[in-house]
Amino acid sequence: MEKFLANSIYIGRGLGFVLQLLGGGFLIGIIVGLLLSIFRYRKASVFLVERFVSVIRGTPLILQLSFIYFSIPGICGIKMGVLSAGIIAFGINSSAYVSEILRSGIESLPKGQFEAAQTLGIPKYYMWKDIILPQVITNVLPALVNEIIALLKETALIAIIGGMDIMRRSQIIAAEQFEYFTPLCIAGVYYYFLVLLIELVGKKIEKKQSDVKNP
């Protein structure tokens, strides 16, 4: 029992690393994804945007992570840590999927809203900020929550470049103690509870938005 608790605490110390990867990666993903979706809707640089999304979605995340961590420093001469490389790689990968989610949300809105805003002379910045995006986020929130959950599970790939996350710590214990079942189960429980937490927060936000719509 004492060994089990010690192993659980050691693996749990990777939570902070995982949350940094998840938070930083999704922040980049939502910002870049939003810009990409707006560019595509406004027909600006459509070819480049579509090729970027196609390449990111069409290549394995492990390849993108390895390229950013191992190749970029050699090409650009920029020293990059494991955490920085992970956040950038997961952020870029997530942005391609987020852009598709937001694009579908934008295209689902009635075109009359855009035309009415233009007729009233509302500046495009405020049109997107106050009229379009709030509706889009509300409509695609479940899909965004699913993307966050998917990104959380994908952060386990950071172990391949030495990131001390939950998965990497469980692998270290398994190698030291020659016991794989228990450490991996502990890691799985940590990931599962994080997923439950994300789902709970997502449902609370959905309920709050529903209460605002239907007081």
Image (tube, helix red, strand yellow):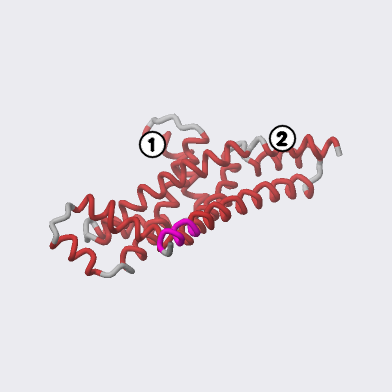
Give the residue pinned by disc 2: 10
Percent x, y for residue 72? Answer: 41, 38
Which residues are the magenta region? 206-213
Q: Residues within 10 Å of mark 1 (few under 14, many from 20)?
A: few
Percent x, y for residue 112? Answer: 22, 69
Query: In the image, is residue 203 part of the stretch drawn in magenta?
Result: no
Q: Name the kind of residue labelled 2 in the image.
A: Tyr
Q: Is residue 35 left or right of residue 85?
A: left
Q: Secondary structure at mark 1?
A: helix
Q: Name the kind of residue labelled 1 in the image.
A: Ile
Q: Is residue 55 left or right of residue 153?
A: left
Residue at screen point 58% across, 54% down: 200
Residue at screen point 13% across, 56% down: 121
Location of residue 14 with respect to 139 vertically, above or below: above
Q: Secondary structure at mark 2?
A: helix
Give the residue pinned by disc 1: 75
Foreground: disc 1 or disc 2: 2
- Observer able to see residue 142: yes
Which image quadrant: the C terminus? bottom left
Task: Pick out the residue farthest to the right.
Answer: 1
Task: Pick out the residue farthest to the front.
Answer: 215
